[in-house]
Amino acid sequence: MATAITQNQALGDSES
């Protein structure tokens, strides 16, 4: 699950 969270963080950064 930690891996999914890391991927989500990258996406959020791009959205920002």
Image (spheres, rainbow, N blue to C red):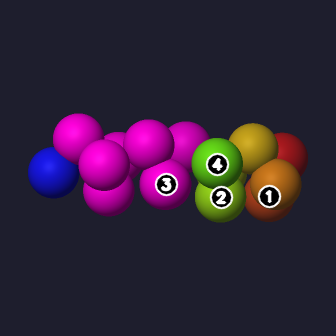
Spot occupied by residue 14 in the image (x, y as percentages of width and height): 82, 54
The Cα–Cα distance between marks 1 and 3, rounded to whole angstroms, is 13 Å
The residue indicated by pointer 1 is 15
Q: Nearer the viewer, mark 1 or mark 3?
A: 3
How crowded pointer 4 is (Cα within 10 Å; few <14, some 14-19, many 20+) is rated as few
Element at label 3: helix
* The residue stretch that appears in magenta: 2-9
Q: Are marks 2 and 3 in contact (CB under 8 Å)?
A: yes
The amino acid marked with disc number 2 is: Leu
The Cα–Cα distance between marks 4 and 3, rounded to whole angstroms, is 5 Å
Rendered image: mark on residue 10: 4
Element at label 2: helix
Spot occupied by residue 5 in the image (x, y as percentages of width and height): 35, 46
How crowded pointer 3 is (Cα within 10 Å; few <14, some 14-19, many 20+) is rated as few
The Cα–Cα distance between marks 2 and 1, rounded to whole angstroms, is 6 Å
The amino acid marked with disc number 4 is: Ala
Dominant secondary structure of the residues highlighted in magenta in the image: helix
The residue indicated by pointer 2 is 11
- Residue at image point 55% right, 43% down: 9
How crowded pointer 1 is (Cα within 10 Å; few <14, some 14-19, many 20+) is rated as few
The amino acid marked with disc number 3 is: Gln
Element at label 1: helix
